[in-house]
Amino acid sequence: MKILSKSGVIEIEVYIDPAYKDKKFYEIVAYNANKKEIGNLNFSIHKNGAWLYIIETNKEYQHRGIGQSLLNVMEYMLVKSSCYHIEGKYYPKNRFAKPFYLKNNFKIENDDYEQFVSKFLLTKDRVLALKRMEGILLSPFEVKDISNKNAFLPIEQTY
């Protein structure tokens, strides 16, 4: 699917991994115009809500709306699945994570080693998630089997 982000039009692919039996595990991947992977978000949906494993963006694409676009797609998928609670964690070493989660209305709980984040998508958040995607979705939304994804190329990390 194509969506509009701060850095222009980007291609987003959504994959599901059928190997997980007790939950749905998804990978959302952003590509630039040259089909290079520039960011990804991994999450799962289970009976109590969703677990956000990671959001990462290629160093040269950070602070250009890619992570926000990935989060928007995830929240859209959650609302469409009637899933309204998100949990996850990040490491304090990542100096960009805390401002990102706070900007997106996540609650942060401290731990010595990692930070836990959570968000409940209230009715107004659900409506906003749908409207955001309606405003930026430029092509049809589709979920693909992860076995159809090209080989994983690691994203360069910057903290």
Image: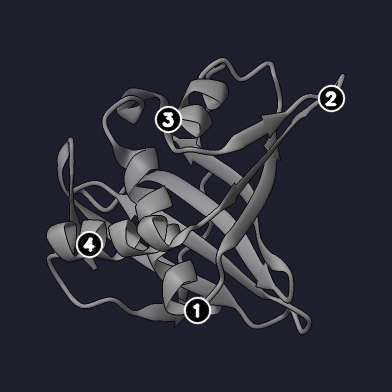
68 left or right of 94 in image: left
The residue indicated by pointer 1 is 81
- Circle on res. 131: 4
Give the residue type at disc 4.
Lys
70 left or right of 32 in image: right
Give the residue type at disc 2.
Asp
First reached walking from the N terminus: tag 3 or tag 4: 3
Name the residue: 48% across, 38% down: 105
How far, Cα to Cα, is label 2 from label 3?
A: 20 Å
Give the image quarter of residue 142: bottom left
Q: Secondary structure at mark 1?
A: loop
How far, Cα to Cα, is label 3 from label 4?
A: 18 Å
Q: Secondary structure at mark 4?
A: helix
Q: Give residue 113's position: percent from left, percent from top.
A: 84, 22
Dot 4 surroundings within 10 Å: few (below 14), some, or many (20 or more)? few
Reply above or below: 13 against 105: below
Q: Give residue 67's position: percent from left, percent from top.
A: 39, 40
Give the residue type at disc 3.
Lys
How far, Cα to Cα, is label 1 from label 3?
A: 24 Å
